Image (cartoon, rainbow, N blue to C red):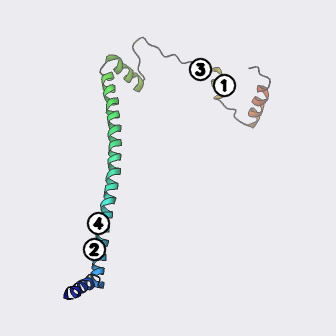
Amino acid sequence: MREFQERKRLKRLIYSKPVLIFLFILLVLVIDGTWKIYQKERESRANLARVENQLTTLKERSGNLSSDVTRLKTEQGMEEEIRSKYEVSKPGEQLLVIVDKDAAATTSPPQNLWEHWWSSFTNLFKRN
């Protein structure tokens, strides 16, 4: 009988309001800590993906730059780069500019309304 009463007293102590409140607070603290760790893990995964993407981009850029450096080490590569950046030519070379007739005609618009009307009227009778 004494054993039964002690079990009952122990059960009352475990199921008392202060112990239950303490256990509930403890549970909330454990859940909060677990949630924060979960959020940090997600943030770390996102950062890892971002950094891996940057690494891939930088490796591609490094490859492009090394190929550019290799190209610029040659005489032809230096000449191409100088010609593309600065308008220079070798001695004896000349510049030839080809102008399209239609492009030259459309670059000068009429000065006033009367000239615009007259050019529109005369364009009706021109042959293409």
On residue 33, which mark appears?
A: 4
The numbered disc on residue 26 is: 2
Viewer-nearest of labels 2 and 4? 2
The residue to which callout 3 is attached is 99
Q: Residues within 10 Å of mark 2 (few under 14, many from 20)?
A: few
* Percent coordinates x, y for residue 103 in the rendering: 63, 25
Question: Which label sits in the foreground, 3 or 4?
Answer: 4
Report, in whole angstroms, how far the alpha carbon at label 1 lies from the one at label 4: 77 Å
Q: Earlier in the sequence, mark 2 or mark 1?
A: 2
Residues at marks 1 and 4 touching, judged by CB atoms closer than 8 Å: no
Q: Which residue is mark 1?
A: 105
> Disc 3 versus disc 4: distance between alpha carbons?
75 Å
Comparing 24 with 14, the one in front is 14
Under mark 2, the amino acid is Leu
Q: Classify mark 3: residues with Cα within 10 Å, few (<14), some (14-19) or many (20+).
A: few
Q: Nearer the viewer, mark 3 or mark 2?
A: 2
Looking at the picture, how far across and down is residue 127, in whole percent? Answer: 76, 19
